[in-house]
Amino acid sequence: MFHARSVSWARGLAIGLAAVLVFSSRLSAAEPAAAKSGDDDTATVDMFDAMKSGDLDVKIFLRNSHEGQVIIKNNTNQPLNVHLPEAFAAVPVLAQAAGAGGQKSYNNNNKQNQNQGAGGGMGGGGGGGMGGGAFNIAAERTVKLKVPVVCLDYGKEEPNAHIPYEIRPIESYCSVPEVKELCVLLGDKKTDQHIAQAAAWHFANQMSWDQLADLKSFPHLPALTKPYFSAADIQAALMVADQARKAADAHKAAEPAAKPAAQADSASAPTAK
């Protein structure tokens, strides 16, 4: 009796183990198919291009001179992988063509466009579980992103939540390449906002490092007056500015090599008869 029960128990255990192994093998076989599904079939769009086509509605709200919030709405009935820009400009809606020419002197206190434009970075994407610069947004859904910014028009009023802004490519507002590279560093969290602000005014408004060192917080309140940028801030800003300058130089050096290749492709293309 004892032997029969042992055999029966052993057979039951063997059948159970076999079932577990079969179930496990089925799960393992299913895993690659699940991994492939992902977002391979989802269209990837550039944020600014999708704004022009109407597929995306993108708004920016600057809370202050340090940060803002970008709200992106997918207007389509399909999910989209949105390629976020590495750098952007936040432009006061009432500021007609201010800043579009490039550098502005810090002595120019033109109050017709009362609030400063700003530049910022998004890190080129990587949110929403995507990576590679793509941010996935479900159909007809809205996402909100917090973004760091720096002011680009010293002498004007600081941004605030009551002033409407619009988001644009950084080149459309400030043509100084070092400013773009600085915004990229800011978006990638490779520099502190306060340090980046000193470098931004240096590049965008041609402020010297001595002028930046002389800036004061609360200049009209002697009891509270102190340097806006400490000596350590200026030293750190010098290093960040050097990084931005080297990155801009590297991109500029790469441009001539790319142009001949494009011309060669054009020359080799068959002509219509």
Image: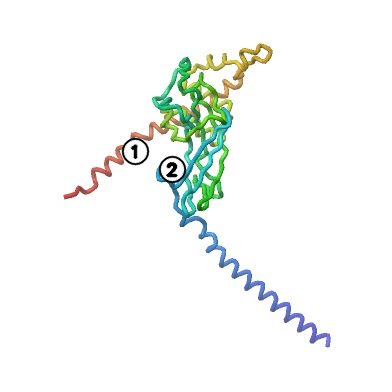
Q: Secondary structure at mark 1?
A: helix
Query: For this view, does 27 lie left or right of residue 49?
Result: right
Q: CA distance from mark 2 to mark 1?
A: 28 Å
Closer to us: 47 or 254 = 47
Comes first in the chain, label 2 or label 1? 2
Instruction: Locate residue 68: give its quadrant.
Output: top right
33 to 180, vertically: above or below: below
- Figure coloring: rainbow
> Residue furthest toward the bottom?
1
Q: x, y (%) of residue 10?
A: 75, 80
Closer to us: 107 or 175 = 107
Q: x, y (%) of residue 217?
A: 61, 17
Q: x, y (%) of residue 253?
A: 38, 32
Residue under label 2: 51
Marks 2 and 1 in Cβ contact (< 8 Å): no
Q: Residue at x 36, y 34 (%)?
A: 255
Disc 1 crowd rating (10 Å Cα; few below 14, some 14-19, many 20+) is few
Residue under label 1: 258
Q: Residue at x 66, y 75 (%)?
A: 19
Q: Residue at x 53, y 14 (%)?
A: 211
Amino acid carrying mark 1 in the image: Ala
Q: Secondary structure at mark 2?
A: helix
Q: Is residue 116 visible?
A: yes
Q: Identify the image quadrant of the N terminus.
A: bottom right
Closer to us: 68 or 42 = 68
Number of marks in the rendered image: 2
Q: x, y (%) of residue 50?
A: 43, 45
> Residue furthest toward the right?
2
Q: Nearer the viewer, mark 2 or mark 1?
A: 2
Amino acid carrying mark 2 in the image: Met
131 to 190, vertically: above or below: below
